[in-house]
Image (cartoon, helix red, strand yellow):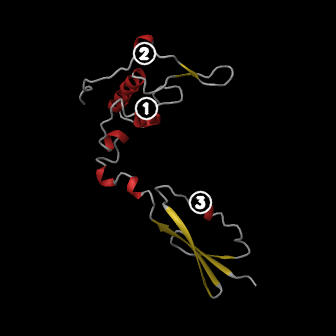
Amino acid sequence: MASLITLRLFGAPLRKNLSICRTLPVIASFSSSKRLQLKQIVCKTEGNVTTIEGVRIPSPRKDNVIPEKYFSKPTACPLCRLNLKVKYSDVLIVSQFVDAFGKLLPQHVTKLCNRQHKHMNMLVNFATRAGLLRSLAPPGPDGKPNYKPPYKYLKYNVHYEKPLKKH
């Protein structure tokens, strides 16, 4: 009474006994990351053979991703590769390179080149002094984060109108 099940996940079919394959650990490895893409499980039954197939489906977020044709060099750092000109007022981009205490993450973590790392360090300082990024002190004894008070001489908004150093 043992019927066969065929797994066709990554091209080559695998035939296994159905009683052994009650829990399929392979199906748990499906993900929606860019490398593996989003997959849909399709079950087909033909006689005694059941085929379970992982079919790639297009991502609903395809319009929000930067196309590969805009990448200049695949080996460059993320900002150089996308040719992004980041300003201190681009808080959503700058905050991706900042740790929980308001400091710039190390270069081996951010994977930025030397030039962009120095530029991002300058942007973090500008954004912090302009009041766009909050500076956090290490947590206190009660476990709550302590916000550093802003500099007294910077209690009014600061705007950097001059163009930054040219690359």
Q: Nearer the viewer, residue 10 or 136?
A: 136
Q: Quadrant of the C terminus?
A: top left
The amino acid marked with disc number 3 is Ser
Neighbour tally class for label 1: few under 14, some 14-19, many 20 plus, Cα within 10 Å: some
Give the total of numbered labels. 3
Which residue extends farthest bottom? 47
Which residue was labeled with disc 3?
29
Q: Is residue 77 visible?
A: no
Query: Looking at the picture, how far across and down is residue 63, in whole percent?
Result: 38, 56
Which residue extends farthest right? 1
Image quarter of residue 75: top left
Query: Looking at the picture, how far across and down is residue 38, in whole percent?
Result: 50, 62
The amino acid marked with disc number 1 is Gln
Which residue was labeled with disc 2?
155
Secondary structure found at label 3: helix
Which of the marked residues, 2 or 1, is nearer the chain's N terminus? 1
Tell me the CA gap for discs 2 and 3: 52 Å
Query: Looking at the picture, how far across and down is residue 35, in whole percent?
Result: 47, 57
Q: Nearer the viewer, residue 12 or 139?
A: 139
Tell me the CA gap for discs 1 and 3: 31 Å
Which residue extends farthest front? 156
Which of the marked residues, 2 or 3, is nearer the chain's N terminus? 3
Neighbour tally class for label 2: few under 14, some 14-19, many 20 plus, Cα within 10 Å: few
Tell me the CA gap for discs 2 and 1: 31 Å
Image quarter of residue 9: bottom right
The amino acid marked with disc number 2 is Lys
Which residue was labeled with disc 1?
107
Secondary structure found at label 2: loop
In the image: residue 46, left or right of residue 128:
right
Image quarter of residue 7: bottom right
